[in-house]
Amino acid sequence: NAGVMQNPRHLVRRRGQEARLRCSPMKGHSHVYWYRQLPEEGLKFMVYLQKENIIDESGMPKERFSAEFPKEGPSILRIQQVVRGDSAAYFCASSPPSLGTDTQYFGPGTRLTVL
Amino acid sequence: GESVGLHLPTLSVQEGDNSIINCAYSNSASDYFIWYKQESGKGPQFIIDIRSNMDKRQGQRVTVLLNKTVKHLSLQIAATQPGDSAVYFCAETTYGQNFVFGPGTRLSVLP
């Protein structure tokens, strides 16, 4: 009964590099959400994906950020040409496939530091 | 007492007392609400949820109250323990989409 897994837990990048954050949802879950959290602040929704589909990306910056959830493998949040302002904790959550509402279960997060 | 810092409001309570954490939500169409607990360096952890057709739900030592008239949600923790110290977030959603999290409240339990 592994929970939501994220890796790496900590990621350091220099300005201009790419950051790739991975999220493996709980077994049986087909919905994945990505959130960003700055220190001492709440979680900001970025993107909601189902297998091979982006359902809602209204919270994701139009440039440099992309997300995918392929048929096989983890969900990936990709940040190109990182800037210092991208430093934050990025959390992934998953929920089971069902109609209506369901609780999201969160992973431990990836803490991205941009030097 | 409760104070508002630069970012997170903080609620300080004595160990053994009851805690009440409040949350104002924004969307009158929201139909599902969740309280999460986040300890330092960890991801949010589900505590309790409530659907919009209810006004109260109880768990183990926790109770969530929903007042749809004023769009207000509260989390009550009975007999607060040191392990309850964390940041607590409320979240609202409509049909499982558009999850919106509140700004969070830091609960500090005093010995």
Image (spheres, coloured by chain):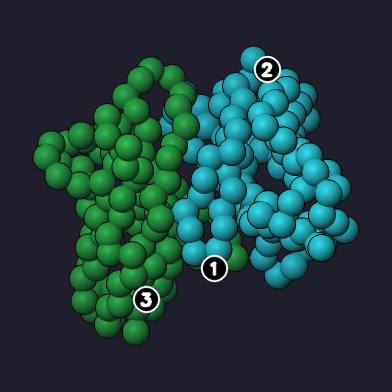
Mark 1 belongs to which amino acid?
A: Pro
CB of mark 3 within 8 Å of CB of mark 2?
no
Q: Residue furthest left?
A: A72
Q: Which residue is mark 3?
A: A113
- State the image coordinates of residue A44 (x, y, percent, origin top left): 48, 52
Real-space Cα distance between discs 1 and 3? 12 Å
Q: Secondary structure at mark 2?
A: loop
- State the image coordinates of residue A51 (x, y, percent, origin top left): 20, 34
Q: Residue at x 39, y 50 (%)?
A: A107
The residue closer to the viewer here, B3 or A8, is: A8
Q: Which mark is residue A39?
A: 1
Mark 3 belongs to which amino acid?
A: Thr
Q: Which mark is residue B54?
A: 2
Letter of the chain in green: A
User: Which class describes the residues within 10 Å of circle 2: few (<14), some (14-19), or many (20+)?
Assistant: some
Letter of the chain in cyan: B
